[in-house]
Amino acid sequence: MAEKFTTFDPAAMLETEADIADFMADAFETGDTTYIAKALGVVARAKGMTQIARETGLSREQLYRSFSERGNPTLKTTLSVMRALGVDMTAKPHAVQK
């Protein structure tokens, strides 16, 4: 019998502000800019790309393109989307390994 697989969409699991903050914190910890952009796109889809487009003044197409796997959003776009999502970017010192 062949196994049946379904596609998992992480956007479906992002129901609360805390879910979104945890998801983005995990993405930031990777330090992988491509992954961070993709994660931000997932969060934007979870909140509704039309709503995010309206709040940022960017087109839905631009948002999808910027936060796709091949996208390369500007810092301005990233910060605008994060603001619309209610997510802050914070800085903290690196843990020093001895």
Image: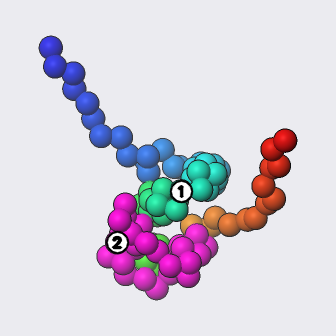
Query: Which residue lies most toward the front here?
Result: 98
Task: Residue 26: say if magenta.
Answer: no
- Residue 78 vertical position relative to residue 7 in the rendered view, above or below: below
Most frequent secondary structure within the magenta stretch: helix
| Mark nearer the N terminus (1 vs 2) | 1
**Residue 34 on image: x %, y %:** 46, 61
Q: Position of residue 46 (x, y in %)?
A: 45, 57
Q: Which residue carries the number 2 mark?
A: 65
Describe residue 61's horizontal placement relative to residue 38 as left or right. Answer: left
- Label 1 vs label 2, nearer the camera: 1
Q: Is mark 1 on a helix, strand or loop?
A: loop
Callout 2, which amino acid?
Arg
Q: Position of residue 50 (x, y in %)?
A: 39, 72
> Mark 1 belongs to which amino acid?
Asp
Quadrant into which the C terminus falls: top right
Choose between 94 and 64: the one closer to the eye. Answer: 94
Above or below for 49 versus 56: above
Examine the rendering and report whether any part of residue 48 can be seen.
no
Residue 5 placement: quadrant: top left
What residue is drawn where x is 35% and y is 65%? 70
Which stretch did the figure color magenta? 55-84
The disc label shown at residue 88, or none: none
Residue 63 seen from this side: yes
Instruction: Kindly report the distance in space between the C-alpha atoms of the residues bearing marks 1 and 2.
Output: 18 Å
Q: Residue furthest bottom?
A: 57
The quadrant the N terminus occupies is top left
| Residue at numbered disc 1 | 32
* Colour mapping: rainbow
- What residue is rendered at 64% in x and 51% in y? 29
Q: Residue at x 73, y 65 (%)?
A: 90
